[in-house]
Image (spheres, helix red, strand yellow):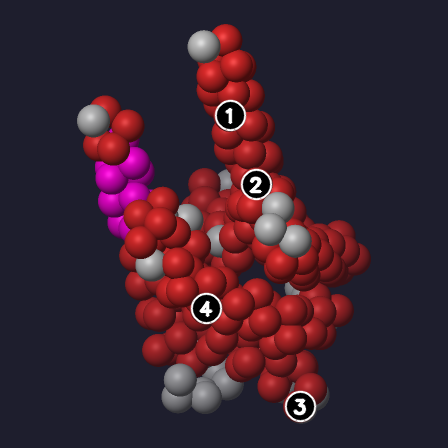
Amino acid sequence: MKAILRSVLTDILVYLLLSVAVFLMAKMIAEYASFDTSIGFLNFKQEYLPNKVWLTAFYIHVFTAVLCLLAGFTQFSAHIQKHYKKLHRYMGRFYAYNIMLINFPAGFIMAIYANGELPSKLAFLILDVLWFWFTYKAVVTAKQKRFGAHREYMTRSYALTLSAIALRSWKIVLVNFTTLDIPTIYMINAWLGFVPNLLLAEWIIRKRRAKNKSLNHAIAQT
């Protein structure tokens, strides 16, 4: 009974956090839906506006990345995985191919033109490559029916998906609670946007491994 209650409460907490994340992203998308190039982030990228490749990549990323966040509602719920397997599988495929075929190339273009000089560009390139790699490995391990490894790679992949929220959150903190200049903030924020997420993902993965190992040991002793 306690395990069921814990699972339900975990799902509720995850859904609440995801709802906040999706709301924040949807709010941002609504801002850019007018295609006004003098608002928000585009204010700081005026010199790149004539570059149609960059501008197209920007809008593709803005309007499709939120769909990756939405997929999280079906990918980490034990209830959905157990009772709605087809939904979990279809949304998982949608999530994976959205990243690998759409957002990876768009993100790569944006990383090359990132603010904050080389440190920022390097951070976003690493983020983009890892996002693709972990998602790809999640697909491969699912097809191989290695579901434990699949879950771990999806955890890493989704941690990087959430960098969209982390980047904006850390920027607010750095702008309002430090006296750093804007270029320095961009460089620091580029790394803070995904490194803590990955560290947290690895902690969750190792905690889950330890729990499974303890459970298997207890079963073997009976």
Horizontal and vertical percent position of residue 11: 30, 44
Q: Determine which residue is flagged by label 3.
A: 52
Q: How many marks?
A: 4
Mark before the other along the chain sequence, 4 or 2: 4
Identify the mark at residue 148; answer none if there is no mark.
Answer: 2
Residue 51 lies left or right of residue 93; in this view the side is right
Most foreground residue, 125 or 211: 211
Horizontal and vertical percent position of residue 28: 39, 70
Horizontal and vertical percent position of residue 68: 48, 65
Kindly identify the residue that appears in the image at 67 percent across and 82 percent down. 54
**Labels 3 & 2 near each other (Cβ < 8 A):** no
Identify the mark at residue 212; answer none if there is no mark.
Answer: 1
- Magenta-colored span: 6-17
From the image, give the main secondary structure of the stretch colored magenta. helix
Q: Does the rendering let one see residue 175?
A: no
Give the spatial CA distance, label 4 vs label 3: 33 Å
Give the spatial CA distance, label 2 vs label 1: 10 Å
